[in-house]
Amino acid sequence: MNKNDLGNFILRAILGFIFFIHGLSKFQGGISNTAGFFDSIGIPGFMAYVVAVIELAGGIALILGIGTKIVSILFAVIMLGAIFTAKLPAGLLGNGQMAGYELDLILLAASIYFALGNESQLSLESKFSQSKAN
């Protein structure tokens, strides 16, 4: 293990945790409220359920290092959707009434990093591929 693997693990675990918490909060806050918000900005309400499940399950998968590329692509799509449908009008730092898209932008960048990057040695994916090689 080297410093890059450790840094990769820390970033991947924190990114996964943030998405997991966001997915959990959608259910705890009433997923129907989130569905209503989605409807109000022109996204079909059922997509709230899809996004919340991807965030929950994908967050856990990312923390463990399972399906990292696929999950990261899904997270990037979610972040692009959030930026362009809900956050862009408020600007980068927000407008006092609505949060900006600065957090969404760094979550997008981190997701793209893992979608394009190599498999980390500190992931279950690498353990599975090592056992298949033996």
Image (cartoon, helix red, strand yellow):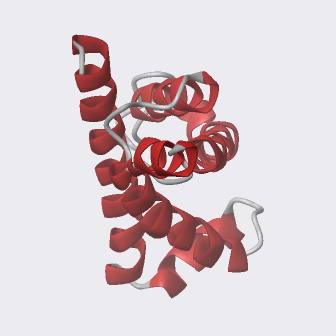
Q: How many marks?
A: 0
Q: Nearer the viewer, residue 128 or 123?
A: 128
**Residue 12 x %, y %:** 36, 37
Q: Quadrant of the N terminus?
A: top left
The image shows residue 39, relative to residue 95, as above or below, that is below
**Residue 106 x %, y %:** 44, 26
Q: Left or right: 108 with respect to 25?
A: right
Q: Nearer the viewer, residue 119 or 87?
A: 119
Residue 79 found in image quarter: top right
The image shows residue 92, relative to residue 15, as above or below, that is above
Question: Looking at the image, which residue is at 47% across and 50% down?
Answer: 131
Q: Residue furthest top?
A: 3
Q: Nearer the viewer, residue 96 or 46?
A: 46
Q: Left or right: 48 with respect to 34?
A: right
Q: Residue furthest front?
A: 134
**Residue 49 x %, y %:** 60, 78
Question: Looking at the image, which residue is at 39% across and 39% down?
Answer: 99
Question: Looking at the image, which residue is at 44% across and 58% down?
Answer: 61
**Residue 108 x %, y %:** 54, 31
The image shows residue 48, relative to residue 28, as above or below, that is above
The image shows residue 133, relative to residue 93, as above or below, that is below
